[in-house]
Image (spheres, rainbow, N blue to C red):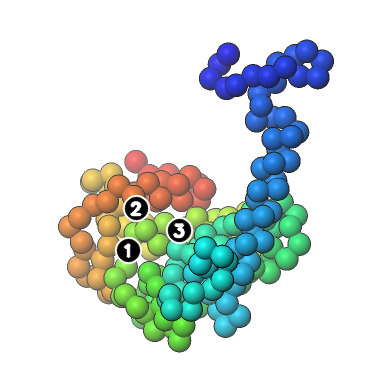
Amino acid sequence: MTGSLLVAGAAGSSQPWMAQDGHRKWLDDQARSLTRFAAASVRGEGGFWWLDDDGRPDTLEPLHTWIACRMTHVFGLGHLRGDPGAAAIADHGVAALDLLLRDPEHGGWFSSVAPGGEPVDTTKAAYPHAFVVLAASTAVRAGRPGARRLLDDALAVVSRHFWDDEAGRTIESWSRDFSEPEAYRGANSSMHMVEAFLRGRRRYR
């Protein structure tokens, strides 16, 4: 064995369990179930609602950028997999990131906005910016309109404000106008930024 579980194949040969048809069908069923659940988060006026445990929109929550990004990523992948209706939801996410959640004055993205579009917190944090890169790169792979410009914009903001060459890690957050950085450096935002860089094919050292 080389680190993966092996099982006997139909003809007596060994096959990794992850490659078996039954396991792949189970994964596909799980993915489709989760996307059906997530589709309830779509907000007609723009953005995505927070869902409670039963899949109902929680309208007391603001519209979170990281949720919009994750939904864009998930439904971008769903479109690549051939899921009906996934492309429209991915496009809805690209539009939310391009118009509703972006700061038109100072650039970058708010962490969250109220349903009316006003920012809840004007701090510019690395965590949601990492997810914007992830969502935009998936939308590019899925061939969604506007995704390439969104990705280029997100990478430019990250390169200019969030990547610290000297430290070799991300800056945690800034004031709204990117004039005052936060001294704290967090592992979680750096981890998600690495994930985003890998999908966005951007190299940092």
| CA gap, disc 1 and disc 2 | 9 Å
Q: In percent of the image, x 31 and y 75: which residue is there?
A: 122
Callout 1: 10 Å neighbours few (<14), some, many (20+)?
A: many
Q: Which residue is mark 3?
A: 131
Mark 2 falls on what kind of element? helix
Give, as a three-letter code, the residue at label 2.
Ser
Query: Residue tagged by mark 1?
Result: 125
Q: Check residue 150 in the rendering and tell me which mark sits there, or answer none.
A: none
Question: Which part of the image, by quadrant, shows the N terminus?
Answer: top right
Residue at 40% x, 51% y is 193
Labels 1 & 2 near each other (Cβ < 8 A): yes
| Label 1 element class | strand
- The CA distance from mark 3 to mark 1 is 11 Å
180 in relation to 142, above or below: below
Please say if 191 is above or below 61: above
Residue 186: x %, y % from top left: 27, 51
